[in-house]
């Protein structure tokens, strides 16, 4: 599990003023709230007094968080500003009554949190379409997934599963065989790994056909991992030979992956289409609505796959070895990138990660 990374704590609308949001990110229990000035802040959720979870507390005047057990109260900088029992005895607040704070950055409609011990290396990735008036965006509620975060990352890079897992909706056998180009680079100072699939005069799978109103089309699909916490998907579709013209349609999809612990993560999705783009299947309905309406079926298939995979990590690795084919190339490269990030934190050597994960799952940790 990588801690020195930006992870999505939520979309901006998940943090209403005056409400406390408790969550675990990369094994750290955190309490996040928005101050009266509108700034999102995060503290260690374990009260410095007796470890009681601060997410059970309440906000006083919007800016001071009072623990529900004995009433220690903390300001947004984590300083203890009141201890009810202590004040009755005329004593001072101990200097050590302090909550650790964690860096939070809100940009492009997303609240990002850095749970690591090293200071942030730079700003979080940009998601300019979310919250832009030029785009119509629909963001899902956070989904709790009972699987290691890497299994979702691998699923999003693993395009061979379009058959059979998604056959009949967004996939087909021909789709699973589309050649995959791989690109590595840097965006806003953050390394990314991208797969690109190009289809020419391609018979679209049923759900894609209905979304775009085309039987046969050219389609370019990009999936990019931007750090361990974000996937940026861009889909462009047009009648054969018409990509880049006014007949092109498409969408941008951001998928965030926020690890809770070794066997749980939170998956969020935010889909955007150019504002004013109608749906070919029904005048008056927007394309982004049509795309999001069909997504739950596909999401549940992916959830089922990775949660079933996770269960198999409960068994020891002895005598078991994974087999990879050419289209697994991006998955293998992503594993190396993530292994290197984990190794840099001293959490595990690259070759030990899989077996450690399996052992931890087997231990019920
Ligand atoms: S545990 Fe929070 S005030 Fe005692
Ligand atoms: Fe999938």
Image (cartoon, rainbow, N blue to C red):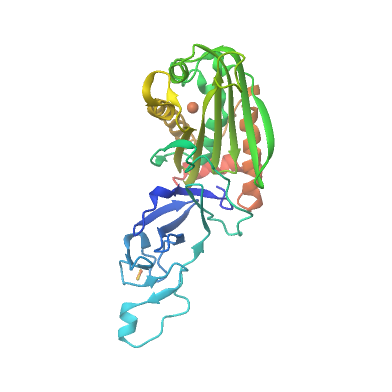
| Residue 269, percent from left and from top | 45, 37
Q: Name the quadrant containing residue 169.
A: top left
**Relative height, residue 100 to residue 96 (above, below):** above
| Residue 314, percent from left and from top | 47, 37
**Relative height, residue 346 to residue 213 (above, below):** below
Q: Name the quadrant containing residue 79.
A: bottom left
| Residue 363, percent from left and from top | 46, 45
**Relative height, residue 54 to residue 137 (above, below):** below
The residue lying toward the viewer, choosing from 208 and 303, is 208
Q: Name the quadrant containing residue 119.
A: bottom right
Quadrant of the image where one finds ligand 1? bottom left
The residue lying toward the viewer, choosing from 300 and 315, is 300
- The residue lying at 53 percent from left, 59 percent from top is 103
The residue lying toward the viewer, choosing from 315 and 271, is 271
| Residue 248, percent from left and from top | 55, 22
- The residue lying at 41 percent from left, 61 percent from top is 45
Q: Is residue 261 visible?
A: no
**Relative height, residue 82 to residue 142 (above, below):** below
How many numbered dots are placed on residues in this image? Answer: 0
Along the horizontal axis of the image, is 269 left or right of 330? left
Q: Is residue 112 visible?
A: yes
């Amino acid at each position: 599990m990588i801690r020195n990374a930006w992870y999505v704590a939520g979309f901006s609308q998940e943090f209403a003023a005056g409400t406390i949001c408790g969550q675990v990110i990369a094994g750290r229990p955190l309490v996040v709230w928005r101050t009266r000035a509108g700034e999102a802040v995060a503290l260690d959720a374990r009260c410095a007094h007796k470890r009681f979870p601060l997410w059970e507390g309440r906000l006083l005047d919007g800016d001071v968080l009072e623990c529900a057990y004995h009433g220690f109260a903390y300001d947004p900088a984590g300083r203890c500003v009141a201890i009810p029992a202590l004040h009755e005895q005329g004593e001072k607040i101990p200097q050590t009554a302090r909550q650790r704070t964690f860096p939070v950055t809100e940009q492009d409609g997303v609240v990002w949190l850095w749970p690591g011990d090293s200071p942030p290396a730079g700003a979080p990735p940009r998601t300019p379409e979310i919250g832009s008036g030029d785009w119509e965006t629909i963001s899902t509620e956070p989904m709790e997934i009972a699987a290691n975060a890497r299994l979702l990352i691998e699923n999003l890079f693993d395009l061979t599963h379009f058959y059979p897992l998604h056959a009949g909706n967004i996939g087909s056998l021909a789709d699973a065989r589309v050649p995959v180009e791989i690109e590595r680079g840097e965006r806003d100072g953050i390394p990314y790994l991208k797969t690109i699939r190009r289809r020419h005069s391609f018979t679209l799978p049923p759900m894609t056909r209905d979304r775009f109103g085309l039987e046969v089309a050219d389609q370019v699909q990009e999936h990019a991992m931007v750090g361990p916490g974000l996937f940026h998907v861009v889909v462009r579709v047009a009648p054969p030979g018409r990509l880049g013209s006014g007949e092109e349609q498409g969408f941008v999809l951001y998928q965030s992956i926020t690890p809770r612990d070794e066997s749980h993560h939170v998956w969020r999705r935010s889909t955007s289409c150019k504002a004013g783009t109608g749906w070919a299947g029904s005048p008056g309905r927007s394309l982004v609505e049509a795309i999001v309406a069909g997504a739950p079926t596909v999401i549940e298939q992916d959830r089922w796959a990775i949660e079933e995979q996770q269960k198999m990590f409960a068994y020891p690795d002895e005598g078991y070895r994974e087999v990879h084919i050419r289209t697994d190339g991006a998955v293998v490269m992503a594993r190396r990138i993530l292994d290197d990030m984990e190794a840099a934190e001293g959490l595990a050597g690259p070759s030990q990660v899989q077996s450690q994960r399996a052992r931890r799952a087997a231990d019920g940790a």
